[in-house]
Image: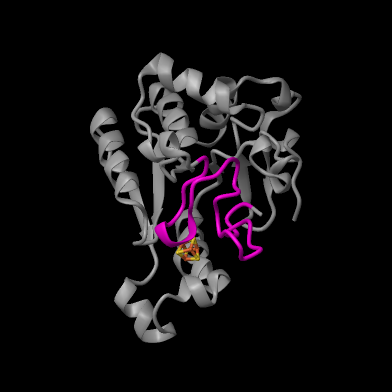
């Protein structure tokens, strides 16, 4: 059932708020029932910093597909060390178990099923019991994301969804990272604008490096 943002924030014009103000608004209304979905891309470096500066006990979770880049696992540990936190982990079956059930390299034969098992299922578990989640989605990342609201009702998962960086550009993100000297996934500086699993990600701008040649553009977490 669709719900109006006014139910959560009254007359506040959320679209007129800065990213920091959106984070504060969501924390005020929903903490501890809200969590940041962290994929260890540069947007999450920014959001982790914004969130934990305002609420050190804020919840953060990651979806471990078991086929993330070594650089992604490395920045994961760096972020945990910098902020003194443990990021909650949600994961699908091990590589061996998935192979036993569906055969080897499912991502080549049926990437939608692979994403469903490794991402969508674990996301459902992560969101269970929450009242809202925070994501690093930005409108200029792809044509499917241009209408992303800063805060809205997520009808599919039935909770509030905030995207505080919705109107940020790449330059905005990098400026914040440099100003705060944040740990950042080094793959970005090697040409990967968007970073997912090793088998499905190549360098490219926007999201063009994801599932190249397959026609698939989203894993299903956000669209
Ligand atoms: S991005 Fe690729 S490897 Fe990762 S879950 Fe989706 S299909 Fe599987």
Image position of 191 with respect to 94: above or below: above
* Residue 139 visible within the image: yes
**Does the magenta stretch mainly form a helix, a strand or a loop?**
loop
Give how far across and how far down residue 15 sits, in percent: 72, 26
| Quadrant location of the N terminus in the rendered image | bottom right
Q: Is residue 162 left or right of residue 1?
A: left
Colour option used: one colour
Residue range in magenta is 193-222
Magenta stretch encompasses residue 199: yes
Image position of 37 with respect to 215: above or below: above
Q: Considering depth in this image, is 37 or 75 the residue closer to the camera?
A: 75
What's the residue at 49%, 46% (across, down)? 203
What's the residue at 51%, 30% (across, down)? 27
Image position of 88 with respect to 173: above or below: below
Q: Considering depth in this image, is 162 or 98 the residue closer to the camera?
A: 98
Q: Quadrant of residue 59?
A: top left
Q: Is residue 130 left or right of residue 149?
A: left
């Amino acid at each position: 059932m669709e719900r109006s943002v006014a139910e959560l924030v009254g007359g506040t014009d959320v679209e007129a708020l800065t990213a920091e103000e959106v984070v504060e608004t969501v924390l005020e209304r929903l903490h501890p029932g809200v969590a940041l979905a962290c994929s260890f891309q540069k947007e999450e470096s920014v959001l982790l910093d914004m969130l934990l500066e305002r609420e050190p006990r804020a919840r953060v979770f990651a979806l471990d597909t078991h086929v993330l880049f070594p650089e992604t696992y490395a920045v994961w540990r760096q972020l945990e060390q910098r902020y003194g936190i443990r990021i909650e982990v949600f994961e699908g079956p091990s590589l061996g178990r998935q192979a036993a059930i569906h055969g080897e390299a499912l991502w080549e034969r049926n990437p939608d099923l692979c994403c469903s098992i490794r991402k969508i299922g674990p996301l459902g578990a992560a969101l269970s019991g929450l009242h809202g989640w925070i994501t690093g989605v930005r409108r200029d990342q792809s044509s499917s994301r241009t209408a992303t609201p800063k805060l809205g009702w997520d009808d599919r998962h039935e909770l509030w969804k905030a995207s505080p960086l919705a109107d940020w550009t790449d330059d905005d993100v990098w400026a914040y990272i440099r100003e705060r000297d944040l740990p950042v996934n080094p793959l970005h500086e090697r040409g990967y604008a968007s970073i997912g699993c090793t088998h499905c990600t190549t360098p490219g701008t926007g999201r063009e490096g994801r599932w190249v040649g397959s026609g698939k553009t989203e894993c299903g977490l956000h669209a």
